[in-house]
Image: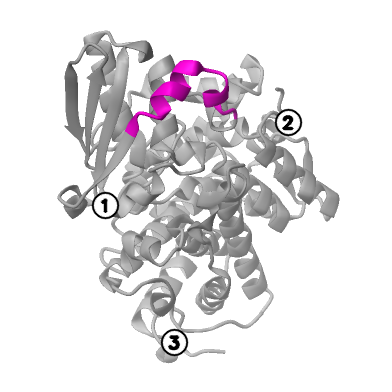
Amino acid sequence: MASSTSLGPMTKAWSSYVGNFKAADVPAPVRARALQMILDGSGALLAAANPKISTGRLIAGFVGDLGGKEEASIVGHGFKTSVVNAALANGTMGYTCDVEPHHPEGVLHPIAVMTPTALAISEMTGASGADFVAAVVLGCEIEYRLSMALGPVEQYNLGFHPSAVCGCFGATAAASFLLGLTEDQVTKAFGLAGCQASGLMAWESDETENSRPFQMGMAARNGVTSAMLAKRGFGGPINIFDSGHTVFGAFSRKSAPEHMTKDLGTAYDGIMELAIKPYSSVSFLHPALDLLLDIARKEKLAIEDVASITLRFPSSGTHCIDNNPLKSHCAQYILPVALSREGLNVLDLFNDRRTTDAEVARLSGQVVVVKDDDLDKGFPNSYETIIEVKSKSGKTFSGRSGIARGYPEAPMAEADVQAKFDKLAGSVAAPDRVADLAACIKGLWGANNMTAYADLMRAPARA
C-alpha cells in the first residue's frame, strides 16, 4: 500500500479530492448547470438509439451478444447488461450525433462520457440522483483540468483525441466517487486509467462515423474498469501524474500542470463553461454556421443564390474540418447542407445529401477552407472564424466571430434548450415519454435512485 508521503503533489491532490468528494460540495448554481447539461446530453444520447443510425444499432448488438450480468441499461434498446459493457455502448451513443454539450476551450465532449459512466455505476450501486449529478460534475472537472494541463492543441498535434484520453480519467473519477473508493484506491484507479488512456485522431478517415463516437465509449468503459479494479484491490501505478512514465510524457510536449490543482474544489469550469450545440456537427464549424445562416437570413439568400463560400479558420484546427471524410467534420458538406435547410438534422451526418441534392453537391465543390495564422493566436480558447459568401449576382457578404450561439458567453434561452431536447428525444420516443424524461431529469437532485431515469432511457427507441 502506497503511503501518502510517496505520492507526488498532483497525484496526491487529485486522489484526496476525489476520495473525499461529496454531493453536498456541489454549489447550487453548478448543480443547476449540470442538470441542464444532463438534459441536453440525454436528448443526444437517446436520439443515437434511432435504428436508422448504424453506430448505436451495432454497438448495442455487440454488447447484447456478449451477454453478462444485467446490471445497467442500454439506452434505447430495452435491455440491461454488465456495467462495463453498458458504459461502452452508452458512451459510444453519447457522442454519435455530435450534438451533445462540448467544452470549447478544452476541446472536449465530457457529458457524452460522464452521463453513461455515472448511469452505469449508479444503476449497479443504487446511488441517489444527487450522487449521480455530483459524479457527472466531478468527472467533467477532472477531464477538463487534465486537457488544459496537457494542452488540447498539444494532444491534437501528437495525434491524440483529448476527449478520449482525458475522458478516461474523468470517467475514472466519476466511477471512483460513486463506488466510494478511498484515497489510496483512487490513486490506483488513476494509475490504471493511465494504463488504458487512448484514442487516436485516426477516426477522421472513417466515413461511417462509427469509430469517432467509439472513442467516448472507450473512455467510459476504461474509466469504469479502472475504478472497479481498484475497488477490488487491483494494483496500479501510483504516480501517474508526477513521476516515471507520466501522462504528461505520453500525451504532451508542452504541458501546463498548474491547471491540475489551481482552485481545485472551488472552481467548476469543467461544467460551467460547457456549451450547448445548436447544430449537429463538429463545434469548430459552429461560428461559421451562425455567420452563414445570419447572412442568408439578412440578405434573403437561398442555396441556389450562392456561388461560393470561403472559410478562414485557425491553422491548428483546419485539418479537422477541411475536406474531412466524416460528414460531421467536413466544412464542404456541413455548410451547404445547413444553408439548404436553415440548419442541420442529426440524420444529415449519416445520409450523404450530396448524392440526393444537386445544389448541395454543387456548392460543396465551391467551399474553400483557408489556414489563417493570425486567427490561430486565440485557438482553442475561441474558434475565431471569418466567412465570405459570394452570390451568383456578384455580391460578397462577410462576417467574423469566435463565439457561437450556445456558448456560456452567448447562452441559448431555456426554452430553446428544452425545444432541442424535445426534438432529439422526440425523434425516437412518444411525446409522453419525452415529457416524463424531461421532468425526471429536472428532479434528479432529489431522487432516491436512478431507476425512473434508467427505465425511461432504456425503453426501445422507434425509428
Above or below residue 152? Residue 95 is above
Q: Residue at x 53, y 59 (%)?
A: 171
Is the residue marked by circle 1 packed among few (<14), some (14-19), or many (20+) residues within 10 Å?
Answer: some
**Residue 4: assigned label:** 3
- Looking at the rendered structure, the number of numbered marks drawn on it comes to 3
Residue lying at the far top in this picture: please name it.
300
Identify the amino acid type marked 2: Ala
Q: Earlier in the sequence, mark 1 or mark 2?
A: 1
Give the x, y percent position of residue 206.
Answer: 58, 48
Give the x, y percent position of residue 289.
Answer: 33, 28
Report helix, strand or loop for mark 1: helix
- Nearest the viewer among 92 and 284 is 284
Question: Based on the displayed image, in which of its 4 quarters is residue 396 positioned?
Answer: top left
Q: Residue 66 vs residue 364: left or right?
A: right
The residue that mark 1 highlights is 315
Give the extent of the magenta segment.
Answer: 351-367
Q: Residue at x 56, y 59 (%)?
A: 219
The residue that mark 2 highlights is 459
Residue lying at the far left in this picture: please name it.
374
